[in-house]
Image: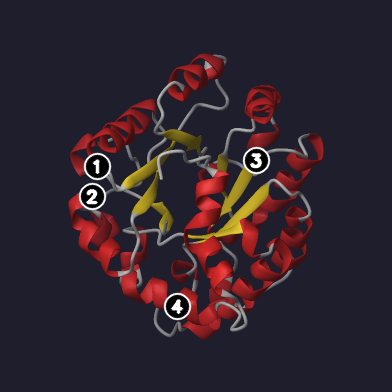
Amino acid sequence: MRIDAHQHYWKTARGDYGWLTPEQGILYADYMPEQLHETLASYGFERTIVVQAAPTLEETEFMLSLYEKYDSIAGVVGWLDLDSPEFGEQYTRFRKHEGFVGFRPMLQDLHDQWILQTGVMKNMELVVRDEFPIDLQLRPRHLPYILEVLRVFPTLRAVIDHAAKPFISEKSLDPWKMQMTEIAAYPNVMCKLSGLVTEANQQTWGWEDLAPYVHHVVEVFGTDRIMFGSDWPVCLTTCSYREVYDALLKSLPPNLSQYDHDAIFGCNAKRFYKLHNT
C-alpha cells in the first residue's frame, strides 16, 4: 500500500484559514480530492493522509466529512486546541471517529516555547498515555523546545513535519543537524520528508540541494521512521507533484532496498497512524 503521508484539501469559502488570502497566489483556490486522484494514481499512491490547514475544530470536522466520502483518504490529522481546558472532551469526541488518526497544533505560527506551557503539557499526558499520533509543524527554532518535551515524555508518538523546515536555501545544516540527531534518539518519533522544496532557493533549486538534508534524516532516523509526503497543494508554489516526487527519489541515498522504499512510501505511515483500513 503506497501512501502519500502529507497533503491538504481546502475550500476558500470556508474562511477559517487565516493565512489563505488572495496574496497567496496559486494557493488561493479550492483544492479537493477530485483534483488529486489522477496524479496519485499515476505514481501508484492508493491513499493519502490529509493534514489540517486551519486551527479550528470546524477544520477537523470538514476533513472527516471528506474521509467519509472519499476512499482515497486513509486518515485525517486534524486540529485540537491543545491549550484548552476542554481539550480532553475534544480529544475524546474526535477519537470516536475511525478517520481521526492524529492531530497537529500549528506550532510554526506560535511563540517558540508555546508547547511548554503548563496547560499544554498537562493535556499532552492524555496523548502520551494513549500513544496517539501528533504531527509537529516546526521550524528549526522550535527544536530545542521539542527536545525539552521529549525529555518529559520520552514515549511521545510524534512525527516532525517537513523535517522541521531546515534552511535549505542558505545551505545551512547546523544546528538543525545536531538537534535532529538528538530528536531521532527517541524511538517513537518519526520524520516526514515533505515540504522541502519550498525551503530551497525558489529560482535555482534542484534535487541536489535537498540531498544533504534527506541523507541526514535517513541516517539518524533510519528508513523505518521516515515518510514521504507531497505537501500538495502547498508544493505548487514551487513545482509540480511530479517534481516533488522525483526530487525525493533522486535525493535519497542510492543504496536503499525495495523494502526501504516500501517503508518510506507507505508502510511507515500505515504503522505510525495505526491505519486499519488499508
Find out whether the residues at labels 4 and 1 contact each other: C-beta distance under 8 Å. Answer: no
Q: Amino acid at mark 3?
A: Arg
Q: Judge the density around disc 2: few (<14), some (14-19), many (≥20) Cα neighbours within 10 Å.
A: some
The residue that mark 1 highlights is 70
> Which residue sits at x=59%, y=33%?
132
Q: Judge the density around disc 1: few (<14), some (14-19), many (≥20) Cα neighbours within 10 Å.
A: few
> Which residue sits at x=57%, y=39%?
134
Q: Amino acid at mark 2?
A: Pro
Vertical arrangement, residue 104 with respect to residue 254, above or below: above
Q: As drawn, is 197 to the left or to the right of 46? A: right
The residue that mark 2 highlights is 33
Q: CA distance from mark 3 to mark 2?
A: 28 Å
Q: CA distance from mark 3 to mark 1?
A: 27 Å
Find out whether the residues at labels 2 and 1 contact each other: C-beta distance under 8 Å. Answer: yes
Q: CA distance from mark 2 to mark 1?
A: 8 Å
Q: Secondary structure at mark 2?
A: helix
